[in-house]
Amino acid sequence: MTTKTTIRPLAAACGAAIALALGAGAAQAQEHTLRFNHVLGPNEPFHRGFTAWAERVAERTNGGLQIQVFHSAQLGVEEDIIEQIRQGANIGQNTDAARLGTWVPGIAVVNGPYFVSSAEEAFSLADAPTMQGWLDELSDQHGIEVVCFDWVQGFRNFFTNEEIRTPADLEGLRIRTPPAPIWQESIRALGAQPTAMAFGDVYPGLQQRAIDGAELTYSNIVAGNLNEVLDVANETRHILLVNFQIVSAQWFDGLPAEYQAALNEECRAAGQATSAEIADAAEAAKQRLVDAGMTIVDDVDMDAFRAAGEAAYEALGLSEEKAALQAEIGG
């Protein structure tokens, strides 16, 4: 078989090439759009950080990869979003190791009580061989690509309407938690009764006395005006929450290599900058709550809480994973 080639005038050929390039560019722009969902409000540092991440990715890819950020769970609840991610949708979600532990149980240790003690320790997890194995498993077997996890949301404390100093003081109190097993077991190990509830339902849940308190950061309390329904901050500092930014592995694999690099690297940079902002703002948020009348309990029996927290790892059979990962990061 022979192929007949027709040579057209140069202007016509150039016009056709330009049209094809424009068409391809439009298709690419549409294909490479990420709708990114998170549950926090528009006044949270994380929302500003996600917006900064989106701006840097757009700049670096000359608009070829756009991230549209949706706050306050506008795209839906986290569990539903993750299922869409696993099916290949161009959706992203801010999540945590507790939920990712649904598919790779070991990774949930990152969300356990007193696992890491600083943001720097959290950042170093990216270089740990055990963590790399878990990330590969999430991507290859479960369709979840972790873009980065350099987003440290600060220490979580118990916020209640009574003072808490020991695990025994939490007995019988219903404390709002996400539904993941490590989170539930962590709060149970520390002495409370875990009650699964969406973040957006915390305020009305406290008003209606469906729960007795929540374990959150100072920034969460300020942003959600939860001090209107909570009187006491008990500084247990039981979890330094490390957030994971995830997308569909199928969608991610379809990106050009330079777009993948931009997404990863700018995620890390924005996450570390946001983590520093949160750390700097923590005391200011705390002072705002004090000024608003909140009582701060800072003489908590930390040794008792740390000892109690070990029961969470034992209950889920994660003690060995905890020891291995902490050894790799020097924790």
Image (tube, helix red, strand yellow):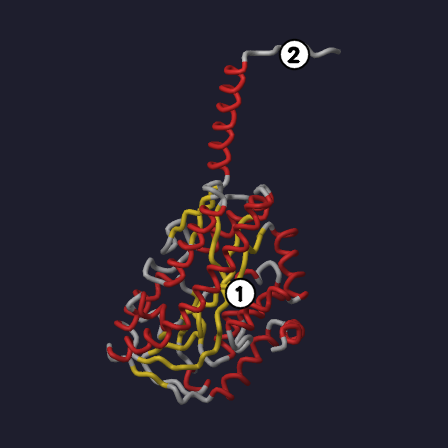
Furthest residue toward right: 1
* Quarter of the figure that contains the C terminus: bottom right
Vertical arrangement, residue 56 with respect to residue 323, above or below: above
Furthest residue toward front: 10
Point 41% across, 55% down: residue: 52
Q: Which mark is residue 98?
A: 1
Dots 2, 1 in contact, CB < 8 A: no
Point 55% across, 46% down: residue: 259
Furthest residue toward left: 292
The quadrant where residue 38 appears: bottom left
Q: Mark 2 — residue?
A: 5
Residue 104 place in picture, x, y as percent: 62, 61
Crowding at mark 2 (Cα within 10 Å: few <14, some 14-19, many 20+): few
Identify which residue, 177 or 154, lies in the foreground: 154
Vertical arrangement, residue 179 with respect to residue 158, above or below: above
Earlier sequence position, callout 2 versus callout 1? 2
Residue 286 place in picture, x, y as percent: 33, 77
> Element at badge 2?
loop
Identify which residue, 85 or 264, lies in the foreground: 264
Which mark's residue is nearer the viewer, 2 or 1? 2
Crowding at mark 1 (Cα within 10 Å: few <14, some 14-19, many 20+): many
* Quarter of the figure that contains the N terminus: top right
Point 66% across, 72% down: residue: 328
Label 2 amino acid? Thr
Work out how far the residue at label 2 is from the one at label 1, CA to CA, in angstroms.
60 Å
Q: Which mark is residue 67?
A: none
Residue 30 place in picture, x, y as percent: 47, 36
Q: How many marks?
A: 2
Q: Is residue 76 visible in this depiction of the protein?
A: yes
Label 1 amino acid? Ala
> Element at badge 1?
helix
